[in-house]
Amino acid sequence: MPATVPARPAAYIQVKHDRADMERAYLLRCAEKFGWPSPAIYTDTGPGWNRPGSGLAALTDDIQAGRCDAVLVRAVSAISREPANVAAFSDLCASHGIGIYGPDGEISRPTIAVMAALSDNIER
């Protein structure tokens, strides 16, 4: 967890089916467990990577505008199944001083790279 509680956390959900409500509730419980305020929720049903109007595009815009200070995901694969996309998102967050967190706490950049590569190999 961060040394300080984020003031403007965000959570990103990417689901294939109608599970957004269940995912939202899960991430809200995670944020509560961390002692965070309720995060702004960004949701995509289906792939969201760099698609205009997607939840991920809105989250990316808000990161660049300084409107969030932490990102919570259930798994790195929610960001994208493509390791290059995950790396680009991780780089964006790092360049704005934003950590990416999973249910167990902050996910380090090397771990994100490994998890993205593994999910890419498993999914194909």
Image: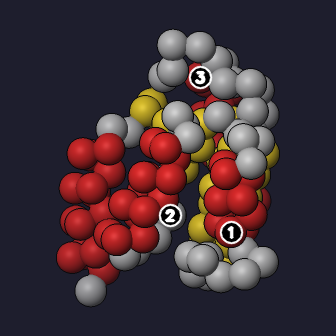
Could you say whether the residue bearing mark 1 is in a helix, strand or loop?
A: helix
Q: Which amino acid type corresponds to the residue marked 2 in the rendered image?
A: Ile
Residue 42, given in percent of the width and then of the height, sits at 73, 58
- State whether residue 113 appears in this view: yes
- Label 3, label 1: how many angstroms apart (C-alpha)? 26 Å
Mark 3 or mark 2: whose residue is earlier in sequence: 3
Which residue in the structure is indicated by mark 2? Answer: 79
38 above or below 82? above
Mark 1 highlights which residue?
57
Q: Viewed as shown, does residue 112 lie left or right of 15?
A: left
**Residue at image point 72% right, 59% down:** 61
Q: Position of residue 89 (x, y in %)?
A: 48, 59
Q: Is residue 20 visible?
A: no
Comes first in the chain, label 3 or label 1: 3
Mark 1 Cα shell of 10 Å, populated few (<14), some (14-19), many (≥20): some
The numbered mark, 2 or 1, whose residue comes first in the sequence reads: 1
What residue type is disc 3 on? Phe
Q: Quadrant of residue 48?
A: bottom right
Q: Which residue, given by chain and number where applicable, does mark 3 sit on?
A: 34
